[in-house]
């Protein structure tokens, strides 16, 4: 909580995602708002900040040194995930970290369901095949030539797609988002299992991580990124999955090894995947093996979206309300949504 400051300087370093609210503070304050802040400009922008607002931009131990950000007292992350901030460095300086939990649950859970149908039914591939016109005027469309595009809809084992009532949806990460995904999946007629953490005996009502890999035909990742979850899903895990499985990651990049995922889809270890998050964001040229001309040309069952599962009008309003309430409450002496 604030400790008797006469004024505050708020710096929003990543306003590209969501409008920054106007704050009603009991003391004078100034605010600098930047749509995006490259690491090369970060130190200069936060040198006088008492409060930083961020979403995904990394606040490392280097920029959290007293010599770089000497006045910093509070960091508010405009998201649920908190892996962008070095917590050890903040703890050493007594800097408070807060987030905005639950603000995007409805949007992200609905994105999960949309991603499920898109990958199970291969909607993007079918659309592209349907509208594709051969460059050679002597050739007709694939649909007209072959009489059907049914082969494109087959799963990696050659079988027709499963229906919802045949699916076992596994949830890894059973917070507010995981619980909402469970509710939506059950309403569609799916069986739902909830995985416990890797390497521990499952608690009542949950299955082991190994069972989650083997039994799920739809695997949904809703867990935070941490040193324990980096590359949690890689080659060994893909080899344990059903060839009918589709993987959906709406949590954080880096939890799924992207090279291993590409090989798993190429080799038919799983039927497909939907990824809204990547290890390096924003993804540029060469930033992910999943995004390349070669991968695009191969017509793999990969649905790739640019970390926008959260985006909805209601989410934007929820985020603004949460940030406004968190900052104003903290300045008045009470801390909410605190993670450190």
Image (cartoon, grey):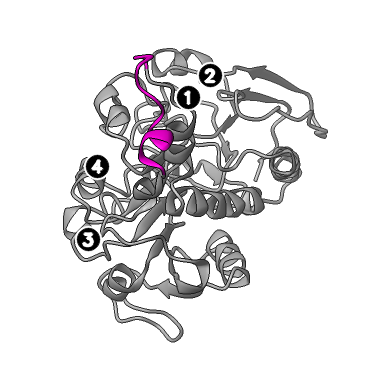
Q: Which residues are magenta?
A: 135-147
Q: Residue furthest bottom?
A: 204
Q: Residues within 10 Å of mark 3 (few under 14, many from 20)?
A: some
Q: Residues within 10 Å of mark 1 (few under 14, many from 20)?
A: some
Q: Is residue 102 left or right of residue 82?
A: right
- Which residue is depicted at the point 32% across and 54% down? 271
Q: Residues within 10 Å of mark 2 (few under 14, many from 20)?
A: some
User: Of callouts 2 and 3, which one flags the residue occurring earlier in the amino acid sequence?
Assistant: 2
- Which residue is depicted at the point 56% across and 23% down? 13
Q: In the image, residue 135 lies at what x, y percent?
A: 36, 14
Closest to the camera, between mark 2 and mark 3, is: 3
Q: Is residue 340 visible?
A: no
Q: Is residue 41 left or right of residue 35?
A: left
Q: In the image, residue 115 lies at what x, y percent?
A: 50, 49
Nearer to me, 310 or 80: 310
Q: Within the image, what quadrant is residue 194 found in? A: bottom left
Q: Within the image, what quadrant is residue 8 found in? A: top right
């Amino acid at each position: 909580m604030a400790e008797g400051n006469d004024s505050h300087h708020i710096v929003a370093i990543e306003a590209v995602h969501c409008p920054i609210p106007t704050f009603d503070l009991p003391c004078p304050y100034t605010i600098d708002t930047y749509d995006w802040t490259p690491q090369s400009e970060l130190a200069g922008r936060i040198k006088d900040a008492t409060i930083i607002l961020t979403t995904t931009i990394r606040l490392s131990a280097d920029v959290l040194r007293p010599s770089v950000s000497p006045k910093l007292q509070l960091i508010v992350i405009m998201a649920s995930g908190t892996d962008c901030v070095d917590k050890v460095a903040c703890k050493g300086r007594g800097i408070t970290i807060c987030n905005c939990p639950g603000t995007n649950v409805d949007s992200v859970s609905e994105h999960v369901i949309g991603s499920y149908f898109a990958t199970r039914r291969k909607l993007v591939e079918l659309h592209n095949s349907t509208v594709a016109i051969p460059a050679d005027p002597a050739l007709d469309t694939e649909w007209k030539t072959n009489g059907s595009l049914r082969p494109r809809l087959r799963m990696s084992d050659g079988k027709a797609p499963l229906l919802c009532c045949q699916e076992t949806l596994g949830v890894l990460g059973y917070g507010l988002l995981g619980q909402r995904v469970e509710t939506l999946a059950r309403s569609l007629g799916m069986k739902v299992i909830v995985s416990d953490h890797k390497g521990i005996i499952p608690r009542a009502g949950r299955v082991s991580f190994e069972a989650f890999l083997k039994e799920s035909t739809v695997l949904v990742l809703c867990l935070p990124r941490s040193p324990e979850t980096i590359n949690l899903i890689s080659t060994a895990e893909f080899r344990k999955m059903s060839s009918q499985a589709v993987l959906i990651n709406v949590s954080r990049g880096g939890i799924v090894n992207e090279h291993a995922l590409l090989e798993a889809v190429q080799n038919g270890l799983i039927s497909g995947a939907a990824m809204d998050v990547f290890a390096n964001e924003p993804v540029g040229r060469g930033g992910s093996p999943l995004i390349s001309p070669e991968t695009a040309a191969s017509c793999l069952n990969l649905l790739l979206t640019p970390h926008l599962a959260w985006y909805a009008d209601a989410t934007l309003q929820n985020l603004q309300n949460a940030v406004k309430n968190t900052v104003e409450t903290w300045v008045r002496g009470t801390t909410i949504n605190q993670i450190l």
